[in-house]
Image (cartoon, helix red, strand yellow):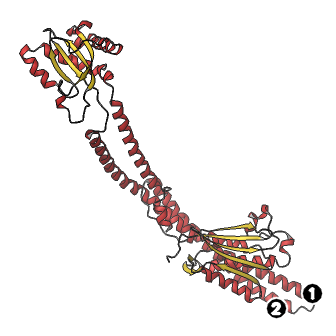
Amino acid sequence: MSEKRSRFSFASAENQIFVILVLAFFVLLVGSTVYQVAQNSTVEERAKSIDTAKTIAIRLLSLDRMRPEEMQGFVETISSCNYGYNLTNEPYAPPSETTVTNDIQRFIVTSLETTSDFMSLGKSMDDISVANATFAEKDFAFAQCDPGELDFPNNGIVISIRLKTGEWLNLSLPERKFEFGSESIYSAMWIGLFFLLVGMVALFFIRRLTRPLSDLTKAVSRFGTNLEVEEVKENGPADIRHAIGRFNAMQRDVRDEVKRRTQMLASVGHDIRTPLTALRVKAELIENDEAREEIIASIEKMERITASALDYVRGESRSEPKQYVDLRALIESECSEFEELGKKVRFKGEDNLHYHCRPIALARAIRNLIDNAIKYSGSADVDLVKGDEYVQIRVLDEGSGIPDDQIADVFDPFTRLSEARESEQGGLGLGLAIAKAIVDGHDGVLKLEPNEPKGLIAVVQLPFGHRQPA
C-alpha cells in the first residue's frame, strides 16, 4: 500500500516533472490564446498598419504596369473576404474627415513616401481618401466569406487610392468578430497532439533517468527497516551511479559492523557468565552473612547489566523476519503474563487487527513499557487504537511522571533519572532504549506524554504500510 501510494505521490521526482510538463502545456495553450487575441486587431489598427500600406503599394505598382482592360480581372483575382478590391471613377465613399480617418490617410501617404521601393508612386494627400462605410453582403468580395465569418451589415473602413488612369482603387477593411473558429480549434488540436507526442517521449526518458533513483530509494527504505543488504544495480547518470555504488558499499559496512558488535557483546556476555558463576559459588562459602549478601547482590547486578546490554543489542538488531500477527492477541498475551504474576494490568483494544512486524521484538518493547509503568505506579492500562494510517499502542500509568525537560534523555542507554524515581526497584536505564530501538526498526515512533492528572503515557505509533488485507 505504501509503495503504491508513494508511486503516485507528488513528492516523487518523476511525478513532479510530469506535472511541470502538464503545466507547460497549459501555459502553451494560454500563450497561444493570448496571441490569437492580440492578433485580433481592430479595423482602425489594421488600416493604420505597415502591412496594409505595403499591400496597397504592391497593388498600385502592379496596376500601373497593366493595360486598362486587364485591371478589372486582376482586381477580382486579388480580392478576398477580408481584403476586397474594386475600381470606380470616384472614391467609394466621401472622406469621413474624422481624427481616425485623417490619421490613417497621413500614415499611408507617409509610408509610401518614406519607403524607397514605393517612392516612385508619388502619391499625395489628394490621392488618398479614407472613409467609414457600412458594407452589405453583396459588396466587394464578401461573397467569398465563410458563413458566419462576418456580421452584416458590417461597419468598416474603405481606403481609396487614385490610379494614373484617373480611376480609384478601393480597398475594403471590414470589422471582424473574434471567435475560435475552425482554424483556432485545429491549431489547438495540433499543438495538443504535438505536445502529447513530445510528452510521451519525455516521460520515457524521465522514467529511465529516475528509475535508478527510485530503486535506490526503495533499497534505502528496506535497509533502514530490516538492515537487509540488497545490492542496487548501478544504472543511470554518472552521479546517480556513484551514489548507488557508495550506498552499496555503506550498507555492507554497516551490516558487517553490526554483526561484529553483536557477536562481540554476545561473546562478552557468555564469557562473563562463567567467572560470575564461580564468584557466586565462592560467595556462598563466606561465613559473614552481611558480606555474603552484598557480594551476591553485586554479582546479580552484574548479571542483570550483562543481560540488559544483550537485550539492547537484540532490540537494535532487525534480523528477526517479519510476519503477520494478530496485534490484539500479542498484546493480550503480554498483559496476561503480568496478571499471572499478580500485577494490575488492564487492556482494551481493536479486534482482528493483523499487522506485519517482528513479533518477538515488538512483544519485548511492549513488555518493557508495561514493566516500567508497573514499577513506578503499581499498575498499567494498555490501549490498542486503530487510526486511518497508524495503529497506536498506549501504555498509561499514574506514577510520578517525568519532567518535560528530561523526557528526551530517558531514551538514551543507561540513562537513569532521579533517585526518587529509580529507588531500589529502578532498572538499569535500558528498558526505554530497547523499546525505542525496536519501534524505530518498525518505522514507528515512541513518545512519552503526560497523563492527566498525573502519570505518564508511553505511545507507540506504528505505520499501516504493511497492514494485511481483510
Q: Are marks 1 and 2 in contact (CB under 8 Å)?
A: no
Q: Nearer the viewer, residue 385 or 7?
A: 385
Would you place residue 290 above or below residue 418 in this image? below
Residue 25: x, y in percent?
A: 38, 45
Mark 1: which secondary structure?
A: helix
Instruction: Say whether residue 223 is visible.
Output: yes
Q: Position of residue 195 (x, y in %)?
A: 33, 47
Q: Earlier in the sequence, mark 1 or mark 2?
A: 2
Tell me which residue sits at (48%, 59%) in the image.
9
Res 435 → quadrant: bottom right
Q: Is residue 142 left or right of residue 332?
A: left
Residue receiving disc 1: 290
Q: Residues within 10 Å of mark 2 (few under 14, many from 20)?
A: few
Q: In front here: 320 or 89?
A: 89
Select label 1 or label 2 by which is in front: 1
Query: Is residue 252 in sight in this rendering?
Result: no
Secondary structure state at the residue bearing disc 2: helix
Residue 37, horizontal then vertical, whole percent: 35, 33
Query: From what the image shows, is residue 172 above or below residue 295?
Result: above
Give the amino acid at mark 1: Glu
Residue 298, position in %: x, y?
84, 82
Where does label 2 land, which residue? 281
